[in-house]
Image (cartoon, grey):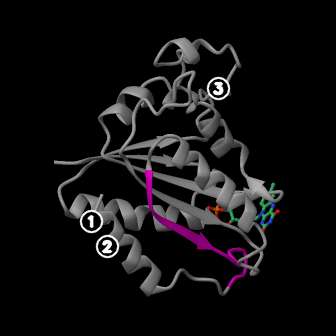
Amino acid sequence: MSKVVVFKASPRKNGKSTELMECVIEGAKSNGSEVVVYDLNDKGARGCQSCFYCTTHDGCVQKDYLQPMYKDIDEADSIVATFPIYFMNINAQAKIWIDRLHPMFDSNFQPRHPNKKVVAIYAQSTPDESAFKNIVETNNAAFKMFGWDLVKSFLLSNTMSPEMKISEETKKEAFEVGKTL
Ligand SMILES: Cc1cc2nc3c(=O)[nH]c(=O)nc-3n(C[C@H](O)[C@H](O)[C@H](O)COP(=O)(O)O)c2cc1C
């Protein structure tokens, strides 16, 4: 049985990134995967304190909401993460998570927990799909630094339009990707 660890960054109850994330989870569960979900909007998730403990140790000193994720990530076959776009960048909740992943490589930038599949889900209100292409690329590059394999990067755009609905095709694709995790 594979283990999938999910990081949800949208604070919205009916956020679009969360909606697609649920399709990936459904697919993973349909294949018998164990799924663990972290809500990055949790008040107990603290930002990196820049102590650099993790350059000499595989872990983080902070005993907060995110502390158990290190064991979960170590055990995980796959990671799913959502990235709402706020002010032309990933939102603060997602950025806190990325910063807290510094222990994923050692002082020589060698991955400590490589070989995980990753699914990233971005959501933005602008319909221009290329508007934050550089942000998406830069953020996805972090996964490469960890030695993780980005199997799919979804981009949901025009999300604030009342007519916007995630297409059945995209939902199906997310479900199918989930089955492979
Ligand atoms: C503070 C804030 C800033 C935002 N800035 C942008 C932006 O710069 N560009 C954009 O396209 N959408 C922006 N949005 C809209 C969000 O990207 C959009 O609501 C998206 O659907 C959020 O993801 P979610 O639906 O998963 O919550 C912003 C939303 C908020 C709350």
- Nearest to viewer (mark 3 / mark 1): 1
Three-letter residue code for mark 1: Lys
- Nearest to viewer (mark 2 / mark 3): 2
Is 13 placed left or right of 161 in the picture? left
Is 157 placed left or right of 59 in the picture? right
Image: 20 above or below 80: below
* Residue indicated by mark 1: 179
Which residue is rendered at x = 58% and y = 57% of the image? 13
* Residue indicated by mark 3: 46
Is residue 150 magenta-colored?
yes
* Residue indicated by mark 2: 176
Image: 120 above or below 7: below
Three-letter residue code for mark 3: Arg
- The CA distance from mark 1 to mark 2 is 5 Å
Figure quadrant of residue 5: top left
If you read the primary sequence from the N terminus, does the residue marked by circle 2 or circle 3 appear first?
3
* Circle number at residue 11: none
| Residue farthest to the right, as pictured | 87
Three-letter residue code for mark 2: Glu
- The CA distance from mark 3 to mark 1 is 32 Å
Mark 3 surroundings: few (<14), some (14-19) or many (≥20) residues within 10 A: some
Report the magenta residues as a range.
149-162
Front residue of 50 and 81: 50
**Residue 19 in view in this figure:** yes
